[in-house]
Each structure stands twice: as structure tokens, then as C-alpha cells.
Amino acid sequence: MVIGWPLLFLQKGQGSRACRAAGEKMGEVDKRVSYTQVVWEITRLLQEAESLEDALRTSLDEVVKAVGAEAGTVWFYNSHGDKRIYPSFWIGGADLTGMSLAPGEGIAGAVVETGKTTVVKDCQKDARWAGRFDAATGFVTKSMVCVPLANKYEVIGCIQIINKKDGSLYNDEDVSLCENLAMLAAIAIDSNGLNLGFTEEKKAIISLRDVKKTFGSGETAVHVLKGVNLDVREGEFLVILGESGCGKSTMLNIVGGMDQLTSGTFLFDGKDYSHADEKTLTMYRRHSVGFIFQAYNLMPTLTAEENLDFIGELCDDPMDAAEALESVGLSGRRENYPAQMSGGQQQRVSIARALVKKPRLILADEPTAALDYETSIEVLTVLENVIKSGTTLMMVTHNEEIAKMANRVIRMKGGVVAEVIVNRHPASAKELVW
């Protein structure tokens, strides 16, 4: 190889240094080429996307992956409201729902106020860092690059890229890539508009902190949940997505009191159920949680109304069974047995069964998986009305189209919450197509 000949004329030790220098230079060139490709991809996404929100979120994900970061957040300034900045899209890291900063407060607030890019080597030692975010979410913020998001008139927010996975610090190329994202995003927002719909902060009814779940022990141990941090807000519809085996249903079982965590903290309405005994969990399930299963789980020898009455007898102040059936459009099926009803009708009975308890929380595990499209829409329309009544709903599903109905969507990967999506304009059930 011709490229190797010059090494023959170098003194001892010079060859390895030259190789390292050449390798580092080639690595820098490769990185610049890679980053250029990312910029082109972001440009395409922002130009071609049907939804600017989706394009911004995907563009943020591209940058987080490219620089090898743990997390990224886009903040927007509510200049026409309470004059605070709010996290609007975030990848990895912590659930920032309901959190905000004043301009000048924290690193993000300082960047919004000054309009200047900031690189922080150690956030924990930086006087500007709003440490309460880590305290509230369980995520440890180490290093950060934060760039202003500005149109031609004003700073409208900022973009944060947080913690390199390999522990290294952000260099000039990383910062340049982040600034390119901010520039392209600002142009797209100016061109297309972005209705952020800042919403009021709601109380967290569920709080999970560093929740881990391991099945088995020793060499055969399976670590399903590896540190879940999540808050679920009162009255919201939360959809949980993720590939099979990522921990979706396990997390739902822990929240529903049907399984116990291995370590971490699980609070419901401020009460700690992390290591509650079986009697406490039974009362929690009986009075606070309604369940909707993929397989309906109706008692075949009881009529629709009797299935509801059976559950109602366990509760202190149940809803009338006939009223619950009417709320799901099944008044005429009160005396029918499950075998005399279609799959969609049986699922609506199971929803009514959950409503009889007047629960503050309903957990749904793949409630439409066994149904065809039209029947699924009927069931989702019923659930839509449940949400409007103020009940909190958590749903596990593989159907990403259903996520369009949710107030928030979390995507799990490898036993942790990898992404949180705030949906400021939820679709109605009848708008969904698959």
C-alpha cells in the first residue's frame, strides 16, 4: 500500500504517533461528513414533514444519536402567556412534563435570556444549573450544550443536548450541529407556524422513580425494568409504546398493583406503594384502579349486568350497572351473556365494568388488539368519553395510530422510558386510520 511507505523513514515511535494523528484527522473528517449528512436529513425532514411537531422531534432524535448523547430537549418561550419557558420535545433522560423555567433561570433560561450558545462541562458545579430537575426526575445531568432557538425578531426557545454516553465533552463540531438544528428549526417555525398550546400544570397522580423489576435470580435473572422515571398527570390519556419485551406491560402491572417492583419508588396520589403488602395492594386495586384487558375476561355464566354487579359489590360507592352499560352504548344488552355478544360489545362491557368502580385510574392493555378497525374505533370512542369525564387512562398498545389520541406518549426501550411526546392537539377516535 502506497500510504504505508513513508512510515519506513520515520524514527522509532514516530510511526505510531503519525498513525494516531492521521487516524484522528481522518476521524474528524468522517465526523464532519457524518454531521453534514445529518444536517441534510434535518433539512429534508423539516421541509417535507406533514407535521412540524413530528419533524422537530425526529430532528432532535437525529442530533442526539449523531453526537452520542443520552438526552435532548427543545424548550419554547411562552412570550404571550406567563413569560416562562417549557420543555416541548424531549428524547431520553427524564420526564419533564409540568416543569418550567423563568427567563434567566437555569442554563436553558439563561440561554433564552441572552441568546448565546452555552457549553457546560459539569452542570452539577455550575451555579446556573436548576438542580431541582434532577431531584424531581432522578436523572443526573452532567454535561450540556444549549443553543438559542431564534427567529429574525426574538429568541423563542432553546435546544439542549445532554450527557455524552462515552463521557467525553462537546466539541466545536457538536456545537455547530446543534446550532444548525436550531437555525433550521427556527426557519421552519417561521414558515409554517407552530401552535404549542401551552397547558396548565396538572397534579401527578402516579410517580415512578428509578423503578426496576427483575425476574429470577443469579445467572438466570431477567432485568425487565432498568430504572423507569415517569409521572402520570391527573386526567390525562397516556399511551405507552415500545417493542415486545421492553417492559410496557410489566410497568402497567406494577402501577396496577398486580406486581411489585424490585427496587425504586411507586407513589399513587402521594401514598407509597413501593413495597406494600398484599392486603394494601388489594384495597388499592379495588378502590382506585379499573382494568381493561385484551381478552375481556368476562365471566361467561353471568349476563353483562351481572358481570358489572359482581364488581360493584366489592366497592364502597359503585356506579349503577345499568348506568355504566348505558354509558358505553349497551343498554339493550343488559341480559345478554358474553357468548351472545360480539368482540367489540364484550370489550365495551369490560370498559363498563371498569367504570362501575368509579376509579381514578384506568389501565388498558392492548384493548383493541383482537378487534377489527371499525370495532376498534367504536371502543376507542367509548374510551374517549371516559377521558373527557376526567378519569386518568394509561394504555399499552402496539398501534401507533392510537397514540394520536393521547395527551402524552411514552416510548419504552430496553426497560426504560426512552422518549416522551407531548401531544397538544389530540385527535378524536374517528380521525384515526390504519
Image (cartoon, grey):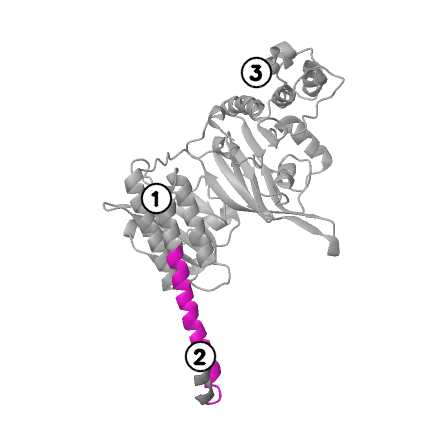
| Residue range of the region highlighted in magenta in the rendering | 10-37
Which label sits on residue 3? 2
Tag 2: amino acid: Ile
Q: Name the residue under label 3.
A: 327
- Under circle 2, the secondary element is helix
Give the Cα separation between the discs numbered 1 and 2: 42 Å
The answer to whether any part of residue 156 appears in the image is: no
Give the Cα separation between the discs numbered 3 and 2: 78 Å
Compared with 184, 289 (above or below) is above
Q: Which residue occupies 31% across, 46% down?
A: 186
Rate crowding at label 1 as few (under 14), some (14 to 19) or many (20 or more) other CA atoms within 10 Å.
some
The answer to whether any part of residue 113 appears in the image is: yes
Tag 1: amino acid: Gln
Give the Cα separation between the discs numbered 3 and 1: 44 Å
Q: Name the residue under label 1.
A: 47
The nearer-to-camera label among 1 and 2 is: 2
Depth order, front residue of 261/58: 58
Tag 3: amino acid: Ser
Rate crowding at label 3 as few (under 14), some (14 to 19) or many (20 or more) other CA atoms within 10 Å.
some
Disc on the earlier residue, 3 or 2: 2
